[in-house]
Image (spheres, coloured by chain):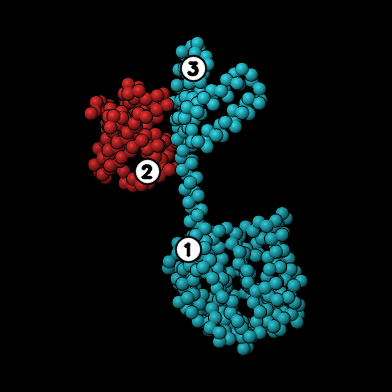
Amino acid sequence: MSDQSSVEILTEWDIVAARQLGRNVAKELGFGTVDQARITTAISELARNIYLYAGKGRIEIQQLTENGIKGILIIAADSGPGIPDIRKVMEDGFTTSGGLGAGLPGVKRLMDDFKIETILGEGTDIRATKWLR
Amino acid sequence: MAQEIENQYKEILNEYMKKQTEQNLYVGQNFSRQLILENIAPEEVISMHKAAIQELYSELPEVVWHSFDFLIEMMINYGLALQERQSLLKQQEELKVEMDLAANVQETLLKTKLPLLEGLDIGLLSIPARKMNGDYIYFVSDHDGYAGVAVADVIGKGLPAALCMSMIKFGMDSLNSSHALPKDVLSVINRIVEKSVDDSMFVSMFYSNYDAKQARLTYGSAGHEPAILYRAKDNEFSELFAKGLLLGVSPAAVYEEHTVDLEKGDLVIMMTDGVTEGRNEDGFIEREVIFELIERKKDEPAQSIVQYVYDELERMQNAQFQDDFTLVIYKKV
């Protein structure tokens, strides 16, 4: 079962819209303040990556139920250049933005499940889930 | 988060709210250690704080609760930074274990046996400044009255130096003759190093060949610290200098070769710059200091002299050697 909605990422303001969408869904599902903040931080990071490296893409938020447990799924999809070395971007201490962003390892830590698929020249699809405990 | 911890936090906080004593703060700070041990993220601490205040002072205005939510948002990246740090610490620990293993492998790889030669007493000490030794000492001996010894120093320390060293060892193994002449040995190793090592890595090497029957030392050097000859009958020290470029600089480098005949009581001191470039509070330790140390013990076995020099230099530098230390002494007996 899933409910879905999405935000196109084109400008920096769309990052805020994606966060808002994620926060609404997370709140509705019953996530506490700390988890809401974690989920929106993950969304921020993913949306920012799209904005900075792919130019445009989409953040999709889905509500999930699996074995009676509710969860939130973030999908970040773009048709950007893809990531040449996934291992590298998943390493601690390596953030492509060169800043203090959480990076993809941060997203992985903030969420419970994390999957990434990327094809050079075609784009990247990242799926991250957090379950309501 | 464990209810237990939340209750404890509320209790400790409540005590402090009632009475702002140093004692109560101290209890709180000790509790924070426990939180860290249990991997409680900073945002969770604030959430816990908010919950506790809500229970204790429910009548506070809305803005206070909003401010806590804002603070939680602020702390998320701090929490991530903390987790990243923990994961990096774990990686560092793993690297340390690997380095220890590599150091063991290197030790085994570079093990060298002191040759037995008629009329020659040999002392040797090689101590790395870090885990991996950037100095290299290797004896080639066929038990036929000849022995070669290579004393080398890779410019650079640690792992890259150690890897470079294994290459030199294989070069030496490929020569595998105690009769080989220094200029030939140096040329061969020079070509190997030149071909296979990064441009920024150089090796200095002193190679000598000793003929026990004639008590004759033939030596050559590739930009290495000159060896020292101590003449017993003159009670004088002099340098055994030989011209030659560092290994790995140019494939066309040629190496000089000289000979010296040893007499009873003479010493040949071969070393790396870790011996001569020691520092104490007043600057570099002068070469003369080392000569003095050696002279004091010249009548003792070669190994005792080597050990004495090391102990004394270590004492002068407050046990802080900056560089790998390798010292070989030949004593004609």
Q: Residues within 10 Å of mark 2 (few under 14, many from 20)?
A: some
Q: Please name whichever residue, A26 or A13, is drawn nearer the observer in this view of the structure.
A: A26
Residue placed at 48% from the left, 19% from the top?
B67
Extreme residue in the bottom direction: B213
Residue that numbered label 3 is attached to: B54
**Which circle marks residue A89 in the picture?**
2
Q: Is residue B212 visible?
A: yes
Residue that numbered label 1 is attached to: B163
- Letter of the cyan chain: B
- Using the rendered view, name the quadrant where residue A70 is placed: top left
Q: Is residue A44 visible?
A: no
Shade of chain A as shown in the rendered figure: red
Image coords of residue A35 (percent x, y):
39, 28
Q: Amino acid at mark 1?
A: Leu
Image coords of residue B183 (percent x, y):
53, 78
Q: Residues within 10 Å of mark 3 (few under 14, many from 20)?
A: some
- Using the rendered view, name the quadrant where residue B309 is placed: bottom right
- Relative to B163, is A88 above or below? above
Q: Nearer the viewer, mark 3 or mark 2?
A: 3
Residue placed at 56% from the left, 23% from the top?
B11
Badge 2 element = helix
Q: Amino acid at mark 3?
A: Gln
Residue placed at 47% from the left, 44% from the top?
B88
Q: Please name whichever residue, B75 or B94, is drawn nearer the observer in this view of the structure.
A: B94
Residue placed at 37% from the left, 43% from the top?
A89
